[in-house]
Image (cartoon, rainbow, N blue to C red):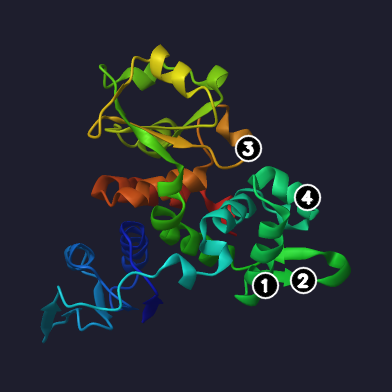
Amino acid sequence: MDVKPWLTTATTGLLDHQFRANTKWIVVTRHAQPVIAERLRELQIQFMDTGGNVFLDTRDLLVYVKGQKGEGPIKTTDLGRPFKPAGMQVVFALICNPGLEQRAYREIADVTNTALGTINGTLRDLRHIGHLLEMGKAGRRVVKREALFDKWVAAYPQQLRPKQFIGRYAAQDPDWWRNADLRDLDALWGGETAAAIETGYIEPEIATVYLEKNLNELILRFKLRRDPHGNVELFRKFWQFRLEEQRGQTVPLPLVYADLLATGNDRNIETAKELRDKKLDRYLR
């Protein structure tokens, strides 16, 4: 049995990765919305929630109920600080930079683009939920990193990603990203585009860009136009560090993984698994 307080498109992707190794698990949650319930059934992931929605499929029994009202999605006030937007910026930096927790609070605040009060509260809550050890003179240590990352990925589509969203745009040439150099704009590729660069595993349908400034210059240079159904999505960059592996082109790999799962798209979920299996180990162990 696996207990998930809330389910999102990202959660279903995570569960798909986990349940391939153990198809007998059952997910228990507060509420599985109809679209999520249907997605779990498609993935053959058994579940039940507090509202009576359920999917059980064994050799002798098939039960599938969806559409029952439950407790509803978890509100931001129900979440601990590490899984609220500002706290998630801190957790993201800790995941991407093993050992960062050993630094002074001021240094952590600088690389996470958050206030000192957020650092203090987030680290305190991480201790309470068992993801941070205080070891006296030996300093602090993040523990159970993989479980912490999975919690972050599950909360990301609801809590942090929408707050960083700038808008959707359209590019005339769907392959514009192939020869586009973003480095002088302090912008980075995310999502499917970053996955294509890092793995060569998919052909991106949506080009995702994270940037801190230079928005108008980006739009003018690449002739982007506002379009709610366009093939380009722009997000604000919410961190202040750069990793050597990025080579000046892509966002940190943990964010690429989270972006892919947030789409709920089958091919992106498969690409995310490929990325996790081959490139995320150094962050999670």
Let me know if residue 274 appears in the view. Answer: no
Residue type at mark 3 is: Leu
- For label 2, the residue is 134
Which of the 4 image quarters holds residue 18? Answer: bottom left
Q: CA distance from mark 4 to mark 2?
A: 18 Å
Residue type at mark 2 is: Glu
Q: Residue at x 17, y 65 (%)?
A: 38
Residue 80 screen position, x and y as percent: 54, 69
Frontmost residue, 55 versus 81:
81
Residue type at mark 1 is: Arg
Q: Are marks 4 and 2 in contact (CB under 8 Å)?
A: no
Mark 4 or 2, closer to the camera: 4
Q: CA distance from mark 1 to mark 3?
A: 26 Å
Q: CA distance from mark 4 to mark 3?
A: 20 Å
Q: Residue at x 55, y 56 (%)?
A: 88
Q: Between disc 2 and disc 1, whose residue precedes?
A: 1
Q: Between disc 3 and disc 2, whose residue precedes?
A: 2
Q: Between disc 4 and disc 3, whose residue precedes?
A: 4
Marking on residue 243: 3
- For label 4, the residue is 106
Q: Secondary structure at mark 1?
A: helix
Frontmost residue, 96 versus 23:
96
Q: In which quadrant of the rendered image does the C terminus lie? A: bottom right
